[in-house]
Each structure stands twice: as structure tokens, then as C-alpha cells.
Image (cartoon, rainbow, N blue to C red):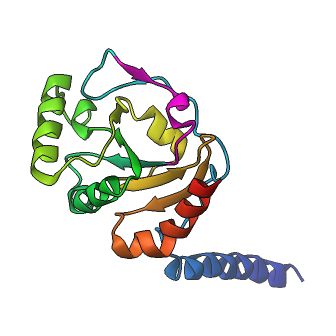
Amino acid sequence: MRKISLFVLPLILFVGLAIFLFQGLFSNPREHESTLLNKPVPSFVLPDLMNTDLTYTTEVFVGNVTLLNVWGVWCVTCAVEIPFLEQLKNEGKHIVGLYYDQDIDPDFGIKTVERVQQEVEQKLGQLGDPYAYNIFDVKRDLSLDLGVTGAPETFLIDKQGKVRLHHIGDINPRVWQNKFESVYQELIAE
């Protein structure tokens, strides 16, 4: 009897691990559910990227349906999505940037805020500027609270400041049409 249990326990553990790993083969890493859906944006007090004397809190989301777009000049995919985001802005969508820079982190080197501002001005000057303003997530605290795994990521926030949709990856015409458009229209109508 003891020999059977010594064989069965490793077999059960192996089968469990195999099932777990097998499910991972068919999961889409862009489609993980945010734990913040239908919850308020986590509280924060962060500066404006271009005017660090100006600060923002969650109050900036109250009263507007907002696309909060996490981005950085170092992000190649962000550069690809910026022209489409500018098109959405020109259609009247309210888009706020949540900017963080890898080079502010001592692990990647040190960069001054002035240098970050210059890089952002240059990048947005080349690609267009879809943002009403950029919140500067200096230490990535808000990004971590939102569960951001990288850039770009976009959160659709309703007029009460609640996260209603989360998308990992770029926003393009297909993604907008298939994932955002109907939810956005519902939130505008509320």
C-alpha cells in the first residue's frame, strides 16, 4: 500500500502541473482580467510631466470618459499607436497619458526631468500629441497600483472615475472597433 501512495502522489502532482502548463499554451497574455474593473482608479498625487508644479489626483477623471494611456518614449509600440490616438483625440475622445521613463530608475541609469521633458516634446512633435496632458508616474507607483505589466496599456475610465476596461497592447482601429467603441459609447450616454 505504501508503494502505491509513493507512486500516486508524484503522478497527481505531475498531472496537475501538466494541466496548468497546458492551459498556459492557449491563454492570451493580452486578455487577463484587471482586478480593478468596475473599481475606482487607485488614489494618487502625481505631477504633470511638462509642469511639475502642477499635480493631479483621481479627481481629474470625474466628469469625463477618459482613456488613460500608459506610455513612454522608449516604447516602440507606443510610437506606433500615437497617430491613431491622435485621430481619436481629433474625434473628441479625452485621452490622458500616464508617462513613466525607464531611465529615471537607478537600475537603468539616471536622467533628469528636463531631459525626459525634451525627449517627450521631441517624440510628440514627430508623431503628434494625442494627450490632454501627461501624468508623470515618476516611481511607477500608479502603474503598479493599476497592475500595469508594460507599455502600452490603456484603461477606459468612466465619468465616476471607475476603470471599465483594460487593454494590454496598442490601440489601433481594429482594437478600438472590437473592444472599445461600444463600451465607450455606453459610457458617454450615461
- Pick the front one: 159 or 45: 159
- In this view, the residue farthest toward the top is 53
**Magenta stretch bounds:** 54-65
Quadrant in the picture for the N terminus: bottom right
Which quadrant holds residue 115? top left
Q: Residue at x 59, y 80 (%)?
A: 23
- In this view, the residue farthest toward the right is 1
Q: Is residue 26 above or below residue 115?
A: below
59 in magenta: yes
Q: Residue at x 47, y 69 (%)?
A: 29
- Pick the front one: 8 or 3: 8
- Pick the front one: 187 or 164: 187
Image position of 99 (left or right of 179)? left
Q: Position of residue 34 (x, y in %)?
A: 59, 56
Q: Position of residue 47 (x, y in %)?
A: 36, 23
Q: Is residue 174 above or below residue 47?
A: below
Q: Is residue 62 above or below residue 151?
A: above
Image position of 127 (left or right of 93)? left
- Pick the front one: 120 or 148: 120
Which quadrant holds residue 13? bottom right
Q: How many marks?
A: 0
Image position of 61 (left or right of 79)? right
167 in magenta: no
Q: Position of residue 27 (x, y in %)?
A: 53, 77
Q: Residue at x 52, y 48 (%)?
A: 65
Which quadrant holds residue 43? top right
Q: Residue at x 44, y 74 (%)?
A: 177
